Every structure is written in C-alpha cells, then in structure tokens.
C-alpha cells in the first residue's frame, strides 16, 4: 500500500467520522429545538391561564366594589384597603398555583402566600383556602364546586382551592372555588 493510499484512506475515515458527528450534532440540535418549543408551548398555556384568572379576578373585584359601595358599614379607606388586599392575595395565589411544578419558585410563593393570609387575618379579612391536608369538606356557604374528581378521599373533601374566597366582617365577599373528591367510578 502506497503512502498516498494510506493517507487517502485515513482522510476518508476522518471525513466519515466528521459526517457522523455532524449528523449526531444536527439531530441533537433538532431534538433540543423540539424540547424548547414544547416547553414554550406549555409556558404560553400557563400564561394564558394566568391572564384568564386575572381577568376573572378583575370582574370579581368589580363585584366586590359594588358590594362595598352599597354597604354603609365600611369606610372608603377600608374599602380600598380590602380590595387591594384581596387583589394582592389573588395574585400571590395565582403565582403559587403557577409555581407548583417549579420547586425553586414554589417555596417562595408558598411563603409569600402564607404571609399574605396571616396579614389578611390580622386585619379581619378571612381567606377561605383549604386543601387535602386540612381534610376540609365542601360547605355550600363558603365554597363553589368547580370540579369533582374520582379519589380515594371521602366524597366532598376539598382537594384543591382553585380560587380563594373571602369573608370580611362576617360577610362573605366571595366563595372559594374548589375541586372536591367524589367516589371512584367502579366499572
């Protein structure tokens, strides 16, 4: 075998390796681009849900505003304060729900929400927010059922609060929207 043939063969092997590496790299880039697109789609979906929730909160704040304006027992300053606190707690709770699958954000959101609930309690604003750990059951005076899902929990037990409710001066400003358990379907 001549030196030229050896060099040509070695050069062809290197070109084949480079082509294989190039193909692997291109496939990796395409896979990464697909994963990024998928995550962006999920993020856009969550953003849409958050915007929808914020619009619903705005409508409910308008309802609270109407209620508070009809009440002679609440001063103008207290009205604005309660509306602001409700709006802040709703926003924090939306952030809390949004961050559930993001551990780094979730702990911060949970701490912020707990602090907001305690602050609301300090001014006499009760936040209606139960969960599966509290073993609270549906109460038609305080809750509105948004979903009932099959579960091993007792029927009617609250699994998750989808939107907080509020009580101020023994008046229910808004019922909490909840997801409750129901008996599993036995088929």
Image (tube, helix red, strand yellow):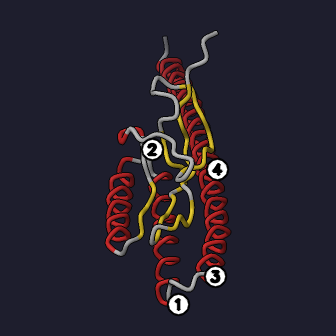
Mark 2 and mark 1 in contact? Answer it, CB < 8 Å: no
Say whether residue 187 is left or right of residue 162.
Answer: right
**How far is disc 4 from disc 2 in space, using C-alphas?**
14 Å
Mark 1 and mark 4 in contact? Answer it, CB < 8 Å: no
Query: Residue 101: which numbered mark, if any?
Result: 2
The quarter of the image holding the C terminus is top right
Mark 4 and mark 2 in contact? Answer it, CB < 8 Å: no
Q: Secondary structure at mark 1?
A: helix
Where does label 3 land, which residue? 70
Residue nearest the viewer, comparing 183 with 59: 183
Q: Earlier in the sequence, mark 3 or mark 4?
A: 4
Q: Earlier in the sequence, mark 1 or mark 4?
A: 4
**How far is disc 1 from disc 4 in space, using C-alphas?**
38 Å
Q: Secondary structure at mark 4?
A: helix
Residue 85, how many percent across, how many down? 46, 74
Query: Which residue occupies 50% across, 84% down?
Result: 74
From the viewer's perspective, is the residue at label 3 or at label 4 nearer?
3
Where does label 4 land, which residue? 45
Q: Is residue 79 above or below residue 30?
A: below
From the viewer's perspective, is the residue at label 1 or at label 3 nearer?
3
Callout 1: 10 Å neighbours few (<14), some, many (20+)?
few
Residue 105, how many percent across, how many down? 38, 55
């Amino acid at each position: 075998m001549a030196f030229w043939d050896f060099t040509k063969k070695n050069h062809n092997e290197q070109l084949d390796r480079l082509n294989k590496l190039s193909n692997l790299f291109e496939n990796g880039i395409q896979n990464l681009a697909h994963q990024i697109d998928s995550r962006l789609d999920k993020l856009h979906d969550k953003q849409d849900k958050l915007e929808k929730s914020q619009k619903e909160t705005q409508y409910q704040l308008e309802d609270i505003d109407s209620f508070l304006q009809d009440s002679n027992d609440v001063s103008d300053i207290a009205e604005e304060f309660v509306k602001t606190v409700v709006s802040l707690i709703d926003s924090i709770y939306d952030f809390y729900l949004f961050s559930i699958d993001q551990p780094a954000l979730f702990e911060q959101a949970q701490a912020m929400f707990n602090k907001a609930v305690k602050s609301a309690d300090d001014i006499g604003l009760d936040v209606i927010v139960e969960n599966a750990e509290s073993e609270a059951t549906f109460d038609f005076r305080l809750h509105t059922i948004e979903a009932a899902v099959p579960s091993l929990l007792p029927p009617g037990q609250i699994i998750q609060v989808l939107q907080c409710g509020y009580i101020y001066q023994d008046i229910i400003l808004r019922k909490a929207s909840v997801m409750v358990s129901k008996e599993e379907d036995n088929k």
